[in-house]
Image (tube, helix red, strand yellow):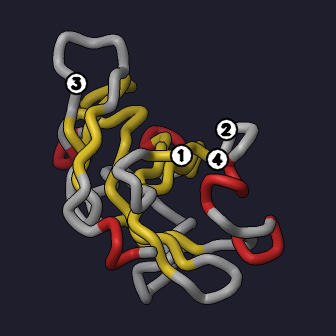
Amino acid sequence: MKESTKGNAIILDFGTTTNPTFIAGGKQRYLIETAYASGSLGVIGYAMINATLRFADGTEAYAVIEVDEASSGEHCGTGVFLPDGTLVFQDDPDFYIKLGKTMEEYAPYRYHPDGEIRTLSNHHIGSDGWST
């Protein structure tokens, strides 16, 4: 799935004046909501970050993850790039059907943030760069 989506672009609408374009395999971080400015980290808050997922069955996919940077990088949501050029979010009722996987093939999954997560302490990411 990962290679069949590389370079796919999707515009996400957060209800702001600018709607960011995320590209499968990219390294973008988009600040959705500001929490506060934190010295050397700059402005942090609730952000959407490019990521790579590794499903329970070992396959990988490009994704975007929602992260609360103000709470030590808490992972709040996941959207997976699909070969048809769309993005499906984990809370979509047809998520597994659109993904073409069962829940057991999908979860538990690990994520690797490809974009920058700005947080003072992120205990969710291991020394290998993947979620723990």
Residue at numbered disc 1: 88
Cβ atoms under marks 2 and 4 closer than 8 Å: yes
Which residue does the image show at 41% across and 70% down from the upper left?
52
Other-residue count near label 3 (Cα within 10 Å), few / some / many at <14 / 14–19 / ≥20? few
Depth check: 2 or 54 in front?
2
Q: Is residue 37 left or right of residue 79?
A: left
The quadrant of the image that shows the N terminus is: bottom left
Q: Secondary structure at mark 4?
A: loop
Which residue does the image show at 28% across and 60% down from the upper left?
24
Q: Nearer the viewer, mark 2 or mark 3?
A: 2
Residue at numbered disc 2: 92
Above-or-below relation of 51 to 9: below
Q: Nearer the viewer, mark 1 or mark 3?
A: 1
Other-residue count near label 2 (Cα within 10 Å), few / some / many at <14 / 14–19 / ≥20? few
Q: Is residue 65 left or right of residue 6?
A: right
Which residue does the image show at 65% across and 65% down from the upper left?
100
Residue 96 numbered mark, or none: none
Residue at numbered disc 3: 19
Calculate the distance from the C-alpha at mark 2 to the C-alpha at mark 1: 7 Å
Q: Amino acid at mark 1?
A: Val
